[in-house]
Amino acid sequence: MIDGGPSDRRSLFRSAFQKWAGNMMERTEQRMVARRYQRPPGALPEIGFLAACTRCGACAEACPPHAIMTVRSDGGLAAGTPHLDAAVQPCTVCPDMPCAAACPTGALLPPLAGWAGYRLAELTLHPERCIAFHGTACGVCAGACPVGETALAIDDAGRPVIRREGCVGCGLCVRACVTTPSSFALTFAEG
C-alpha cells in the first residue's frame, strides 16, 4: 500500500511505466534488428539510424575509399542502409568524415571532437593466430594503422599491442593482417 498522496502514486506509476517502456524498446529492437552491421562514422544508435536513414546513398558517394556498401535486399528493415565491412574495404579514417557530412537526414552526424575518442568498433587481437607471437617478425598491422602508435604499436618483443584509447576500430589492420583468419577481429556496438 502506498503511504503518500497523489504524488507518490504518480512517482510509482511513472517508474513502472519507464521500466515497462524500456523493456518494450529492448524487445522491439531485438525483434526488428536481426543482424548488426558496422555503420559508417557518426551513425545514430541502430533504431534511430534505421528510422532516420532514407537509403539515399549520399554517404557512399562521398566515401573516398568506397568503403561504404549497402545492406542487401534480404536484410529486413536494414535493407538499403549503409554499412562497412573491413574484410572488403575498411574505413580509412578520413579526418573530415565526408560520409557523415554528406548525410542529409542526420542519420550520420560527424562527432564534435572528430575521431578523438570515437569508435567505429572494438578491436581484439587473437595472439594464438598472430605469427609475431610464434617467433616470426611481422608488424604489417601497425604499418597499416592510419592512427599510428596511439592505436596500434609493436612492443619490444615485436608483438602488436592495441591501445584502446587511440584505436577507432576502422579495420585496416584486420584486412592487412597476413594470417588467415586475421589475427584481429572487430566487434561493434549493440545499438
Image (cartoon, rainbow, N blue to C red):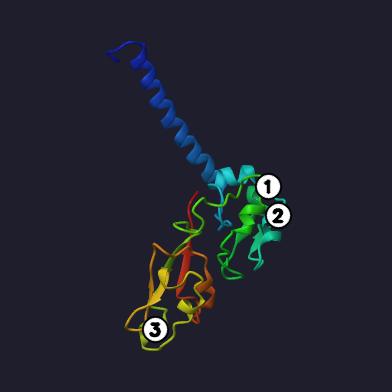
What residue is pinned by disc 1?
104
Position of residue 107 measured from the top left corner of the image (x, y, whole percent): 61, 47
Quadrant containing the N terminus is top left
Quarter-wise, where is residue 126 in the image?
bottom left
Task: Give whichever of discs 2 and 1 has the lower sequence position.
Answer: 2
Q: Give the secondary structure at mark 3.
A: helix
Question: Quick one: which residue is furthest to the top in this view?
Answer: 5
Please state which amino acid type lies under the numbered disc 1.
Pro
Taking the spot 40% from the left edge, 21% from the top edge, the residue there is 13
Q: CA distance from mark 2 to mark 1?
A: 8 Å
Other residues around mark 1 within 10 Å, as few (<14) / some (14–19) / many (≥20): some
Q: Which one is nearer the viewer's eye here, 41 or 177? A: 41
Q: Nearer the viewer, mark 1 or mark 3?
A: 1
Q: Residues within 10 Å of mark 2 (few under 14, many from 20)?
A: some
Q: Earlier in the sequence, mark 1 or mark 3?
A: 1
Which residue type carries mark 3? Ala
Q: Badges 1 and 3: C-beta atoms under 8 Å apart?
A: no
Q: Check disc 1 and report its element: helix, strand or loop.
A: loop
Q: Are marks 2 and 1 in contact (CB under 8 Å)?
A: yes
